[in-house]
Amino acid sequence: QLQLVESGGGTVQPGGSLTLSCTVSGFTSGATLDDYAIGWFRQAPGKEPEGVSCKNGNDGRYRYEDSMKGRFTMSADKATNTAYLQMNSLQIEDAGNYYCVADPRLLMCVLSRSRAYDYWGEGTQVTVSS
């Protein structure tokens, strides 16, 4: 059973930066983080989850929601089975609970459908406030 644990959330002022981490465990035998589609979704109170960034399971390419391009950078370290989300120039509308998601069935990750992912972490809260 895949397990995902996020960390790194907190409170920052507008224009600030945060780096989120997602440590993944419970891989099937021989599998690594490179073999999974993995991504980040966020959810603000009263809203549906919104895709932020993800990594394909087949070619390792990264994808970003348009409003995050140039501000957010996702990366993954196979050696430590940890995915990261570096967030710069944070805005008030970036606040929410950020979830790490993964699914071994996806060859290409998706940002438009949170339900495409079977495995979710508990989330880490990001607050942007002056």
Image (cartoon, helix red, strand yellow):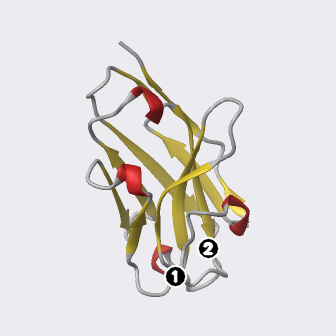
Q: Quadrant of the C terminus?
A: top left
Between residue 49 and residue 102, name the one nearer to us: 49
Q: Position of residue 28 (x, y in %)?
A: 65, 79
Mark 2 Cα shell of 10 Å, populated few (<14), some (14-19), many (≥20): some
Instruction: Name the residue: 36% across, 66% down.
Output: 77
Q: Amino acid at mark 2?
A: Phe
The N terminus lies in quadrant: bottom right
Residue type beneath disc 1: Asp
Q: What residue appears at the point 60 percent right and 59 percent down from the top-left corner?
A: 101
Q: Which mark is residue 27?
A: 2
x then y, percent, for residue 31: 55, 82
Secondary structure at numbered mark 1 = helix
- Taking the image as shown, residue 96 lies to the left or right of residue 10, namely right
Query: Where 130 falls versus 85 (above or below)?
Result: above
User: Mark 1 = which residue?
Assistant: 35
Q: Residue at x 26, y 53 (%)?
A: 70
Residue at the top extreme?
130
Whole-number angstrom distance, CA of label 1 to CA of label 2: 10 Å
Q: Quadrant of residue 111?
A: bottom right
Q: Nearer the viewer, residue 8 or 85?
A: 85
